[in-house]
Amino acid sequence: MTAPIRIFLGGDVMTGRGIDQVMPLPVDPVLHEPWVQDARTYVRLAEAANGPIPRPIGPEYVWGDALAELRRTDVDVRIINLETSITLSEAHWTGKVIHYRMHPGNVECLTAAAIDCCCLANNHVLDWGREGLAETLRTLDAAGLRYAGAGPDAPQAAVPAVLPAPGKGRVLVFSAGTPCSGIPREWCAREARSGVRLLPDLSESTARQLGSEIRRVKHPGDVAVLSVHWGGNWGYEVPAEQVEFAHRLIEEGVDLVHGHSSHHVKPLEIYRERLILYGCGDFINDYEGIRGYEQYRSDLRLMFLLRLDPETGQFLQARLVPLQARRFRLHRATEADAQWLCDLLNGLGSPISLEGDYCLLLHR
């Protein structure tokens, strides 16, 4: 039997705004938010909450203890939802409340973690307009970073990222988003217009369409991942239409559903021996010190270290590493916080056990 294919999935990675301001090449800090007009305000809020942040930070800084876990696990592919525009564009999307961007010169913060694929079908990649998207794609290309979910036109936005796993086959990453996650409908890529892969709805026909696209490019031994940005930012409830849509995707040939948008972790499910993550939560952001929704403990993060059968795509094991964000850096969570996450997920119907190293384990 071929050795399991090992995949790291991260939730939303938001390296713009406050985090960009402590990097070596920050963009102009001017924001167009109704409450905050200077990105450095988010740095001050984080420092007031947890202490001083060094300046400038190195490219590995934000990943913190996650890097040691990645090296220890020796994963085959690393996939994140990159929820930030990488651009110097000043053409912010008017009418939108929040705008994230990172200086192209700071892209090393992504390559420092050896990220293999950035999923882009989300509600921040066009924050600085279509010019900003074009520069984002150029920057990722120049850095050797693969991506999916956005492009110069609809056909290219739908093309999956193909990630080789030597000796084990390939991982195909499809990325799509939904309007309910806050993606403006005007961002939808068209035949002659750049944008993101925006799903019209979560209907059976949409699932069938995705399934047809996946089957056209999926070869025997390929593992198909559908990374989907859906739902609101807060709340543990998973709408019935998301559950039904995820189930249909599995029936149509998807091997792993990588859901995100919520700022905190949501339930996991094994369906037909495939894993569905309804909400991975944020992984990197600048939210420290922002008040409200404290009951969700969005300072706690999970890195999803998965093992799949490369021949069938079946789920074998998930090791979830609890982390806590402090001073814009990821630290291993305490035993008490790991237990809190374990109790939360069990309470949400996801059977998780707490191991001796304070990691959470989900078996078949």
Image (tube, rainbow, N blue to C red):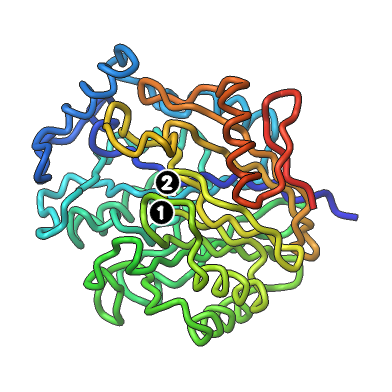
Q: Where is residue 342 in the image (x, y as percent from the top left)?
A: 64, 36
Q: Looking at the picture, which amino acid does disc 1 mark?
A: Ser
Q: Position of residue 1 (x, y in %)?
A: 91, 55
Q: In this view, does 145 lie to the left or right of 6?
A: left
Tally of marks: 2
Confirm or deny contact between disc 1 and disc 2 (CB under 8 A).
yes
Q: Position of residue 96 (x, y in %)?
A: 16, 57
Q: Name the residue under label 2.
A: 12
Q: Name the residue under label 1.
A: 261
Q: Mark 1: few, some, or many residues within 10 Å (few <14, many ≥20)? A: many
Q: Is residue 98 left or right of residue 310?
A: left
Q: Looking at the picture, which amino acid does disc 2 mark?
A: Asp
Residue name at image x 32 percent, y 12 percent:
51
Give the answer, above or below, for where 330 lies relative to 128: above
Residue name at image x 35 percent, y 76 percent:
154
Q: What element carries label 2?
A: strand
Q: Disc 1 to disc 2, how far (Cα)?
A: 7 Å
